Amino acid sequence: MSETKDFFKEYCRFVDSVTSTPSKDDDVFNERIAELSKWLKGNYARMDTAMTGLAGEAGECADLWKKLKFHGKELSEENRQKMIDELGDICWYLANASNALGVDFDDIIRRNIEKLQARHPHGFSSEYMKKK
């Protein structure tokens, strides 16, 4: 048992050694929050809400998908609508993130399309891109 305990102690020492200072020190963390808030022009709270909300909602979508795929959850219209609702929640948090950055949501989508077009030049075509 001692060998296992020593292994986990060593692992925890390793984790501590590679963890950033703002992740371990409240004063340094608070300084970083102040820097981020200034960089975001006072929108740190909005961005923090958006990032944690995105993680939570993506987790809810993934959990529902997992249950549909592996646990025999009913392939019903109700569960389809639940997935749509969760995707809508993701969009809500994406809009909050775009507001925090001071960028229009459609600009984010356009940039994503441009990035994907460069990566996959024969895989996307849209009239919307012609309106830029």
Image (cartoon, rainbow, N blue to C red):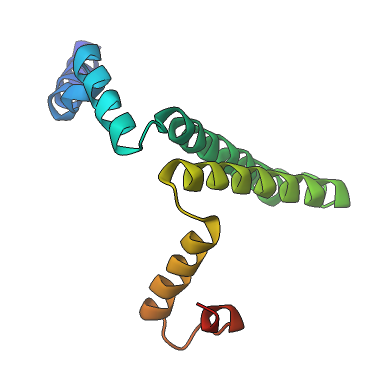
Q: Position of residue 32 (x, y in %)?
A: 24, 26
In the image, is 106 to the left or to the right of 120? Answer: right
Asked whether the viewer can see residue 11, the reply is no
Instruction: Please name the residue shown 39% across and 71% down the image.
Output: 115
In the image, is 15 to the left or to the right of 57? Answer: left
Q: Is residue 88 above or below residue 25?
A: below
Q: Position of residue 119 (x, y in %)?
A: 37, 77
Q: Position of residue 58 (x, y in %)?
A: 56, 43
Quadrant in the rendering for residue 125:
bottom right
Count of marks, rendered view: 0
Instruction: Please name the residue shown 74% across and 51% down the image.
Output: 84
Quadrant in the rendering for residue 20:
top left
Q: Position of residue 31 (x, y in %)?
A: 22, 21
Quadrant including the N terminus: top left
Quadrant in the rendering for residue 111:
bottom left
Instruction: Please name the residue shown 49% across and 48% down the image.
Output: 98
